[in-house]
Amino acid sequence: MAVYYILIPAEVSSNLARHDGQRYQFSDQSGTDLFESYTQSRAKGFGREAKRRIMIGTYVLSSGYYDAYYKQAQTVRTKLINEFNDALEQYDFLIGPVAPNAAFKIGENADDPSKCTWSI
């Protein structure tokens, strides 16, 4: 989970940095100039969770924290991939739980992003 919460926001941040609201997705045309159109499109087009992930991803990718967080998470991800590949060389399939616990009730844990991957 720690690797997920470092790598995914970083990838979201870098991918959504290209979103300008002019060529695709939501576009707010009420701005008086191009910069204002960009900022309004991003402000209105992204939800709370997307904005949160963009901010976390930008932080993780910043120069002072890249090696401390992002680079180490990439190393762990590569090790996990290698472990799965090694296991799949010996076995045809793996069986295991898909979640660490039973599903939450709707709205439960919505304020704790480490317990769920969505928010209301």
Image: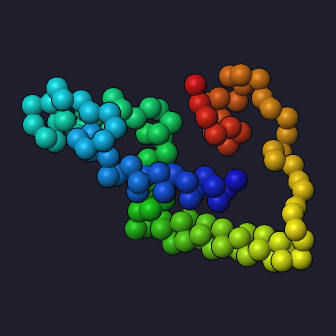
List x then y, in percent, for residue 90: 89, 77
Residue drawn at x 61%, y 52% is: 5
Tell me if residue 102 comes above or below residue 100 in the rendering. above
Extreme-left residue of the structure? 32
Residue displayed at 18% across by 29% down: 29
Q: Residue at x 32, y 52 (%)?
A: 18
Q: Is residue 35 above or below residue 44?
A: below
Q: Quadrant of residue 93?
A: bottom right
Is residue 83 visible in the rendered image? The answer is no
Q: Position of residue 114 (x, y in %)?
A: 67, 43
The quadrant in which the C terminus is found is top right
Image quadrant assignment for residue 108: top right
Left/right placement of residue 70 relative to residue 54 reads right
Observer-nearest residue: 103 or 25? 25
Q: Is residue 6 visible?
A: yes
**Given the current orientation, which residue lies at the most extreme top position?**
106
Front-lying residue, 80 or 110: 80
Residue drawn at 49 percent across, 45 percent down: 53
Residue 60 in percent (x, y) is at 48, 59
Left or right, 62 with respect to 75, comes to: left
Please indicate whether residue 107 sits to the left or right of residue 105 in the image: left
